[in-house]
Amino acid sequence: MKATGTTTETAAETTAAETTATETRTKMKATEMKATEAATARAAGTRTHAAETGAAAAGAAGARATETGPAGTAPGEPRARLRIAVLGASGMVGSRVTREAAARGHQVLALSREPASDDPAVAPVAVDAHDPEALRAALTASGAEAVVLAVRTEPADRDFLVGTTRTVLDAAARTGARVLVVGGAGALRSPGRPDLLVADDPAYVPDDLRPVAAAGVAQLRAAQEHAHGDWVYLSPPALLEPGLRTGRYRRGGDTLLTAADGRSWISAEDLAAAVVDELESPGSERHLTVVHRDGPPAA
């Protein structure tokens, strides 16, 4: 009797999970139809920008950096239209990634607890990242070719960040989606000190921010230890804040970069451009970073 009860409960749990996934797919379709039509129209009229690329000095530790910008594909070069799910779509980075991707004509699913978008090209999807089963079901049902993980907590919640990263990678392993994790600068190497992470360098991270930096390092480790192999971890520079979209930035490897003015910074708008650039034209690095580059704004 006890064994039979366990079997019945397991079957019920499986049925409930399947029902949740089916309901999620049904809810998505209604919003996606309008979003698809709007994205198609937008893609037809979206301007592509010239991409300027050249070698740049990366500073100490021999880190490779390239000069990039304005963001986008070259004139006349076809851009593959992607289906992109953005988790944390209401946050500083996630909202800008959503807007950037939609502006380039991609299909965008904006996942957050209280999704809201006045952009007809964006399909909002309500899901709580604190609920692993609901999140896994939403991502599995989304049909996304790429998933952008852009969640952060204040104060830092290391367990949540690591758990959510694993859940997203679990779902991606089932669907074959590429995952781009917008992580933290703490996981980068300090300039001139390849043996020292930024998270452990008091020159960049004061004591009160150590938990935030450590959570980012743990998130990177979770990705590195996961069986799903199609992921990339993008560390912003030391300072990330709202600003202008110039489409110009330097791209580097796993060492912190600084701008021409000596600061390590980028606007959230330009970070979003770098995220979508990476999804459209994936590089070979598993861990990369970007930093502001001076120059006239992109047209």
Image (cartoon, helix red, strand yellow):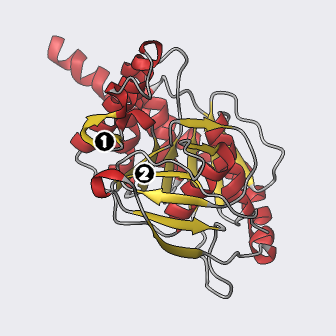
Query: Whole-percent x and y of residue 101?
Result: 66, 58
Which residue is more in the foreground, 83 or 21? 83
The residue that appears at 34% across and 65% down in the rendered structure is 284
Determine which residue is flagged by label 1. Answer: 223
Disc 1 vs disc 2: Cβ atoms closer than 8 Å? yes
Number of numbered discs on residues: 2
Q: Amino acid at mark 2?
A: Val
8 sits to left or right of 198:
left
- Image quadrant assignment for residue 265: top right
Please identify the quarter of the rendering in which residue 293 is found: bottom right
Q: Position of residue 220 (x, y in %)?
A: 33, 38
Q: Secondary structure at mark 1?
A: helix
In the picture of the structure, the residue carrying the numbered disc 2 is 179
Which residue is farthest front?
Answer: 261
Pick the front one: 194 or 162: 194
Q: Residue at x 40, y 17 (%)?
A: 211
Q: Is residue 1 visible?
A: no
Q: Amino acid at mark 1?
A: Ala
